Amino acid sequence: MSEGKERAEARLSNLEAIEPLLGSLRVLSLSTMQMALNRQASLTAYAERFSLVAAQVRLMVGDKPVKHEVEERFDYRPVEQNRVLAVIGSSRGICGQYNKQLAKLVSERLEQRDGLPTKVLAFGVRVQRALTQGGIAFDGQETLGQGSKPAYDLAGQFLRGWTAAFQAGTLAKVEILSFRKRSVGTNYSPVFTTLLPTSDQERPEDEQKQLPWPAPIIEGDPEVMLEQIDNHLLAIRFYQLILDAIAAENLYRYRLLEEAKENTSNLLEELELAIQAERRKEITQQLQELLVGSGMLAQR
């Protein structure tokens, strides 16, 4: 057996072992993406119904600002404010430039220097590596995604901390950097989203529509109820961002695996043709040797 044929057969054997694994990973990425999208659709439908209730309570409160129960400060020195930039990245590989794009945007945002000190929170081991390579200081955190759903306990823990700090005046802004779907289709891109402070423009469109039922009778303090409703809507927005990031990550991974699968199929075909050509050469050489040995063909 020739050395070229042995090498080709070894490569063929390796690729034949890898091909089913690539196919399994590809199907897993596609199914995880679809489950995340299904969860997001359900969450969006729930948010729309919940926003109708919020609109009713908001009408009763009117333009009065929502009161937050904050402990009285006995230290009257100026409050030092900062902002948080939370980066939702990946903890798994095979997603190409996904995390490097996030790291690049973090670097660009930090260079703007708007006067407020910025604390960068990096969710995901892979994005943490990308930030380290870029020389960016950050606080590493666990991933915010568990398969196809958000890590609700971890997300809720950060939301409560951010909300309390914002109400106390020590936190001026919370920005989320994550991949989001910008338009109709399957294209995702990294986007900065302001989670705190919220604005009227960020409220769901359903709150701007005409309400489908007469104003209900609400027992209790509507201002307290509205505060709880707003906190709930804030959590929904955060969960939607996480689900968008999960879908985007798995879409990136699926596309790379699809390309790898196509390349593997092409290599398998090329190697099979190369091995067949080597076998034909061997058979031809053996026939020539037999014919020469029998005297039917003159030896060259």
Image (cartoon, rainbow, N blue to C red):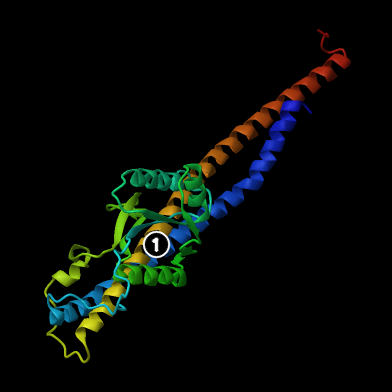
**Residue appearing at x 63%, y 31% in the figure:** 273
Q: In which quarter of the view is residue 269 placed?
A: top right
Q: Look at the picture and state if 68 lies above or below 220.
A: above
Check the image and report above or below for 233 versus 80.
below
- Location of the C terminus (image quadrant): top right
Observer-nearest of 171 and 152: 171
Question: Residue 216: x and y, percent?
Answer: 16, 88
Residue 161 visible in the current orientation: yes
* Residue beneath the point at 22% across and 80% down: 53
Seen in the image, is 79 located left or right of residue 266? Answer: left
Left/right placement of residue 282 relative to residue 43 reads right
Give the image quarter of residue 295: top right
- The residue pinned by badge 1 equals 242
Which residue is rendered at x = 50% and y = 42% of the image? 133
Displayed quadrant of residue 43 = bottom left
| Residue type beneath disc 1 | Ile
Residue ID at (52%, 54%): 125
Give x and y (percent) for residue 87.
41, 55
Foreground of the two, 56 or 132: 132
